[in-house]
Image (spheres, grey):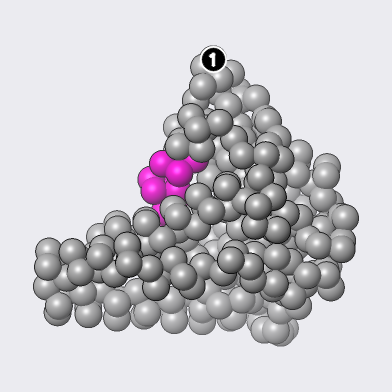
Amino acid sequence: MSTITLFQTPPPELIKSQILQMVVDYLTDISMVAIAPSNPLYNLYQYGIGFEVHLYLDALDGSKGIPVELIVALDDEDPSIVVGFLLYLPVKDDPEACAVPYMAVRASHRRQGIARAMLHQMLGRYPHADLACTVAKVPYFESLGFQVLGARGPQVVMNTYDHGTDSLLAVLDVAPIYNSLEVRQIHTYLLQQHGKRAMTDAEKKRDRQLDQMTRHAKAFVQERLGESAVPGIGGGLRLV
């Protein structure tokens, strides 16, 4: 069992560090790219997505002008242990709407209703919720009341309503992360470790997988809805 806790300000460092460790541990599940640990680019994405989540957690203090809320599941037997987290973004000018960029549950605590409990608390605050997932995860979210709206790149867009919100969603501009000195240094290290040919092959493998996932998502949506366009959630207002 677990205790579900809402944070509207930055969580304690002990909780934050465990959330970031979960991002690193479950990157393949969390990342839109679904990159595998066997791909030499894996470490680069661990840093990039980990840093993105770090910035969102810091944004809970309101300093970046982005509405962010966090729901954390803590182990009942040891409340110092984070067993799941749900990071979501309330939508500007729509008090009922939000979007979910990141959610994870520890492998040891899955199939215990933790994700369902976290989403239930979020939906109690924002019943008009948007998320994107792989085709394989669609049945799970459908069981929670989400419905397919369309395809967005390699993912299927789902919503608790039959439409997205028309209001703006403020999100972080993550481009500076991947253009940063730290990412360049990681890439240089990986080049030295694996060699140029292996890194080029890794990029091609990632791109092929993304293309395959994109085709799969589009075909799934076409079969399900008879269309491929998606009314995304609001407009993306990107803030640094």
Query: For the residue carrying disc 1, how many other residues have a C-alpha within 10 Å: few (<14), some (14-19), or many (20+)?
Result: few
Q: Which residues are magenta?
A: 19-29
Q: Quadrant of residue 185?
A: bottom left
Q: Position of residue 93 (x, y in %)?
A: 87, 63
Q: Is residue 83 visible?
A: no
The quadrant of the image that shows the C terminus is bottom right
99 in relation to 108, above or below: below
Instruction: Tell me: 86 left or right of 144.
Output: left
User: Observer-nearest residue: 212 or 166?
Assistant: 166
User: Observer-nearest residue: 181 or 227?
Assistant: 181
Q: Which residue is mark 1?
A: 77
Residue 25 located within the stretch drawn in magenta: yes
Q: Residue at x 75, y 44 (%)?
A: 122
Q: Position of residue 167 (x, y in %)?
A: 83, 70
Residue 136 located within the stretch drawn in magenta: no
Instruction: Tell me: 31 left or right of 194.
Output: right
Task: Please name the predominant secondary structure of the magenta segment in the image.
Answer: helix
